[in-house]
Image (tube, rainbow, N blue to C red):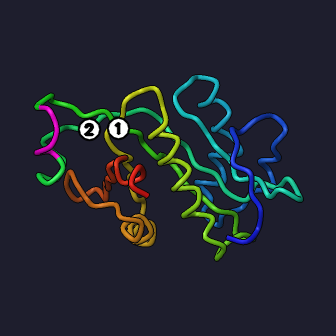
Amino acid sequence: MSQAFVIELLGPRHDKAGFSSGVEALDRYLRTQATQDIRRRVTACHVAVDAPGGKIAGYYTLAAGAVLLRDLPESLAKRLPRYPTVPVARLGRLAVDTAYRGRKLGGALLWDAGMRALRSEIAAFALVVDAKDEQSEAFYRHHGFIPFGGPDRQLVLPLATFAKM
């Protein structure tokens, strides 16, 4: 990623209308729902801003969550206490504007989300995502996520992985 981006919380100064990822549901969420979700404290939305132009190049949402211990792969679950649920950080949405594709911005946003979750003062064991389709599932698997919990394309990556990088 050679271009300079600044990743910051979505705020009133950001032009959400100009964002286009090519996925209408993701674009509509940023334009119409993200601010409400932030105000209600159900998610945090971080945007990657093109440093010279100030345009939103990508975004992700991050929220607290939990998963059932019994749904995690045994290789992860065996190291955890036997509580019924495990605290996680949930990556709700991740999108890159079509004008910025091919610059590894998606991976940089994913890294930023993992590091924010790792540094949080609220404990979380892993970063969890629900991949929407085969392409997004392949993206997350490429970055080390593993499936869990059944056929719903839920993927998990322990936050300890980010600490090792």
User: The N terminus lies in which quarter of the figure?
Assistant: bottom right
Q: Label 2, on which residue?
A: 67
Does residue 122 appear to the left or right of 47 in the view shown?
A: left
Q: Residue furthest front?
A: 164
Q: Cβ–Cβ below 8 Å for labels 2 and 1?
A: yes
Foreground of the two, 34 or 116: 116
Based on the displayed image, in which of its 4 quarters is residue 41 positioned?
A: top right
Q: Position of residue 137 (x, y in %)?
A: 39, 66
Query: The disc labelled 2 sits on which kind of residue?
Result: Val
Q: Secondary structure at mark 1?
A: strand
Query: The disc labelled 1 sits on which kind of residue?
Result: Val
How many angstroms separate mark 2 from mark 1 (CA)? Answer: 7 Å
Mark 1 burial class by Cα count in 10 Å: few <14, some 14-19, many 20+: many
At x 62% / y 30%, what residue is drawn?
Answer: 38
Q: Secondary structure at mark 2?
A: strand
Based on the displayed image, in which of its 4 quarters is residue 108 positioned?
A: bottom right
Q: Which residues are magenta?
A: 77-81
User: Quick check: 98 above or below 53?
Assistant: below
Q: Is residue 45 magenta?
A: no
Foreground of the two, 134 or 106: 106
Q: Label 1, on which residue?
A: 88
Q: Residue furthest right?
A: 53
Q: Position of residue 25 (x, y in %)?
A: 58, 54
Does residue 63 appear to the left or right of 66 in the view shown?
A: right
Q: Position of residue 150 (x, y in %)?
A: 19, 55
At x 62% / y 59%, what residue is drawn?
Answer: 24
Does residue 74 appear to the left or right of 109 in the view shown?
A: left
* Overall secondary structure of the magenta section: loop
Label 2 or label 1, whichever comes before in sequence order: 2
At x 58% / y 49%, what residue is drawn?
Answer: 60
